[in-house]
Image (cartoon, rainbow, N blue to C red):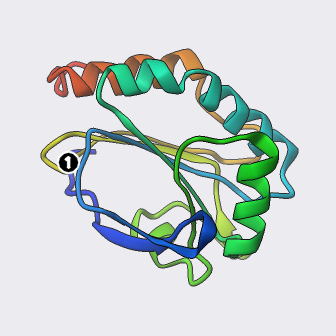
């Protein structure tokens, strides 16, 4: 926490490129389209998307899946936020959220403020290790409102 968030550009659903430079944003790294727990998490985030948007927080999901898998997942779950493909693991490694040895992202959540500084991060030790959704929403909306020093 407190480090600059790496900027990046990755393919999004449909093949267009999505560029990220700074927040406020909630970056959700997930294991892949095949992960049932990840799909449940993405559905829950979709349900709270309006709360995030109202606070000015961009929600971005990233995995090592290819564009075709990401597109299929986004359509199936009716996701209305960017789902990005990091097949080379460049962003996953840049944020230090790789599940080493498996060439996928560990389930991770990163909150970036409007200056592009990482204000909160959770890197799961296992597929089940994820922060409570309520906590994630609270931290992200707090950071977006300018309370980046005392949001946890």
Residue 56 location (% of width, % of height): 29, 29
Let me know if residue 136 appears in the view.
Answer: yes
The residue sitting at 68% across, 26% down in the picture is 44
The residue sitting at 68% across, 38% down in the picture is 42
Quick one: 78 or 109, which is closer to the camera? Answer: 78
- Figure check: 108 above or below 119: below
The residue sitting at 62% across, 69% down in the picture is 14
Quick one: 20 or 124, which is closer to the camera? Answer: 20
Local crowd at mark 1 within 10 Å, few (<14), some, or many (≥20)?
Answer: some
The residue sitting at 49% across, 18% down in the picture is 135
Q: Quadrant of the C terminus?
A: top left
- Figure check: 7 above or below 80: below
Q: Which residue lies furthest to the bottom in this view?
A: 88
Horizontal arrangement in the rendering, residue 2 relative to residue 89 (left or right)? left
Residue 58 location (% of width, % of height): 38, 40
Horizontal arrangement in the rendering, residue 129 relative to residue 15 (left or right)? right
How many numbered marks have been drawn onto this rendered protein structure?
1
Residue 100 location (% of width, % of height): 65, 71
Q: In which quarter of the image is the N terminus?
A: top left
Badge 1 element: loop
Residue 121 location (% of width, % of height): 41, 41
Let me know if residue 99 appears in the view.
Answer: no
Horizontal arrangement in the rendering, residue 126 relative to residue 35 (left or right)? left
- Figure check: 152 above or below 37: above
- Figure check: 16 above or below 45: below
Q: Mark 1 points at which residue?
A: 117
Q: In which quarter of the image is residue 147?
A: top left
Horizontal arrangement in the rendering, residue 138 relative to residue 13 (left or right)? left
């Amino acid at each position: 926490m407190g480090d600059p968030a790496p900027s990046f550009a990755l393919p999004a659903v449909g093949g267009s490129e999505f560029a990220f430079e700074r927040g406020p944003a909630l970056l959700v790294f997930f294991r892949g389209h095949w992960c049932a727990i990840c799909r449940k998490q993405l559905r829950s985030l979709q349900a709270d998307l309006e709360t995030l948007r109202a606070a000015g927080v961009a929600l971005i999901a990233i995995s090592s899946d290819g564009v075709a898998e990401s597109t299929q997942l986004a359509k199936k779950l009716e996701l209305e936020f960017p789902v990005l493909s990091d097949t080379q693991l460049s962003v996953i490694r840049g944020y230090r959220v790789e599940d080493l040895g498996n060439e996928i992202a560990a389930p991770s959540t990163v909150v970036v403020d409007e200056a592009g500084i990482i204000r909160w991060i959770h890197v799961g030790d296992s597929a089940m290790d994820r922060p409570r959704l309520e906590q994630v929403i609270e931290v992200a909306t707090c950071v977006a409102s300018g309370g980046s020093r005392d949001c946890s």
